[in-house]
Image (spheres, rainbow, N blue to C red):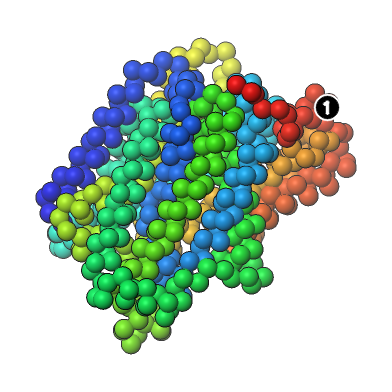
Amino acid sequence: MKALDLAIIFAYLIGIVLFGTWFARKQKTTRDYFLGDRSVPWWAVAFSIVATETSTISFISVPGIAYARGGNFQFLQLVFGYLLGRVVISLLFIPSYFRGELLTVYQLLDRRFGGRIKILAASLFVVMRNIADGIRLLLTAIVLAAVYTSSQPLANADTIIIASIILIGLAMIVFTYFGGMEAVIWVEVIQLGIYVLGALAAGIVLAGAIEGGLDAALATAAQYNKFSLFDFAFDATKTFTFWSGLIGGCFLTMSTHGTDQYLVQRYLCTDRPRRAILALLTSGAIVLGQFIGFLFIGVLLFAFYQPFADPNYAAAASPAFPFTGGDRVFPDFITRHLPGGLSGLVVAAIFAAAMSSSLNSIAATFVNDLYKPLQPERDDKHYLKVSHILTLIWGLVQIAVAYFCRHLNRSALDLALSVASLINGPILGVFLVGTFLRRVSQPPALIGMVVSIFSMLYIYFFTKIAWTWYVFIGSSITVFSAWLASLAFAPAPDSKRDELAPGRRLESQ
């Protein structure tokens, strides 16, 4: 990697920091800091959702899925579930987000059940999101380390990874600390353009570098069944099947896009539900197209490296042979085979996907759902100050998570989605309880969540059930357990039963 590439990378990081600080002048209240005064256009929210959903994990890991031995396009079955989940969210949840002034989605649980349910759901979100985004930070640091060691082969890779974690983490902290949620959204709009351009450029160069060109790559892919799309097996231990994709992907999206503050906060930055729905559905079409593109890059990488030509290929311990993991394949091509300048652009694109910060969403949740109940009489300036401090603290926590996870060999995509799915099931389940089981009050809902959490921990550590089923199972356990427990408790008051009810008319504005 040449000096020009490194200059592009560091210029991007500096530009992001300066862009975030420019928004600091607009952050006068917590509403400004967390919701951008609800004045963000729907198309910017749509692009922000795509950038948030994609991340570095998808940019690097999804090509690795198609590259791996036995890998193919069956990951798209999960994406079909993502699309179905968006439709359900638009009908079921989004209308309730615009009833009253919400700063976090968990305030709906407070209205429906009371403070203990809200505190539990908010706490689970804070824990899960910090772990998942710490892993995303780590993956980006691995890419930066690969960039550096490609030009400095004697450098200690672990030391470079640690330094990269700190560098990228601090840049993320600074622009979020000053710019708030509005800066995060507009940075993500820019990032989407950068990483789509970078991926296209890498794909074009990759296709031209394959001996025999695109036709040879397609022939190789067909020979090794890389374009296989559907698997209709009823096997809960397989990660990507039609049923786990459609059902599991639908419930996963209902949780991440419907009950997770990280994404719901983006809807709340618009001024009416119809625009939020339009943003969500538009993002689904874009996400489908880009995942097809990422998988196709993986097919091209398979044809370029030709691991099948090695006699040890079939028996190799790593499915990504000769690499230790699928996450290493695309970074290797970027740093070793792209021409000068373009390599820096693609690495900047990877950084773009990584800089989709969750710190503002975590701060919003902690301040509004966990801190305010303890300090209810303080003025808004105090809460804004606490929000800034928490942005810094949670940024340091994510840096620590990345540091301690840096020796894991498991796919970052698989690990991050497993962690998210493990915790999102109980949270989605309690939203479904509040929506459909009008009789259930706070105690049985709390019992349902606790039973689900312990059940999911057992499933995660002691079974081979694929993570794609986690949210469906976790939410189902919550609903069933809450219903069963409700038989022994008094019903919810009439005043609380309709707080999450679907079907209320949307605002016509």
Left-right relation of 476 to 356? right
Query: Which residue is more in the foreground, 39 or 28?
Result: 39
Which residue appears at 15% of the width and 55% of the height? 340
Which quadrant of the figure contains the C terminus? Answer: top right
Q: Is residue 126 visible?
A: no
Tell me which amino acid carries mark 1.
Answer: Pro
Residue toward you, 123 or 412: 412
Locate residue 431 relative to residue 314 in the image: left or right.
Answer: right
Residue at image location 46% in from the left, 76% down from the top: 225
Q: Quadrant of residue 183?
A: top left
Q: Position of residue 353 (x, y in %)?
A: 36, 46
User: Does 338 appear above or below 180?
Assistant: below
Q: Is residue 85 left or right of residue 202?
A: right
In the figure, is residue 140 to the left or right of 337? right
Taking 291 as reference, is 103 above or below it?
A: above
Query: Is any part of residue 346 visible from this angle?
Result: yes
The location of residue 386, given as percent across then percent down, is: 45, 23
Tell me how many marks there are.
1
Residue found at x 61% / y 48%: 85
Please provide percent x and percent y for residue 104: 57, 29
Q: Which residue is mark 1?
A: 493
Q: Quadrant of the N terminus?
A: bottom left
Q: Residues within 10 Å of mark 1 (few under 14, many from 20)?
A: some
Q: Residue furthest left?
A: 3
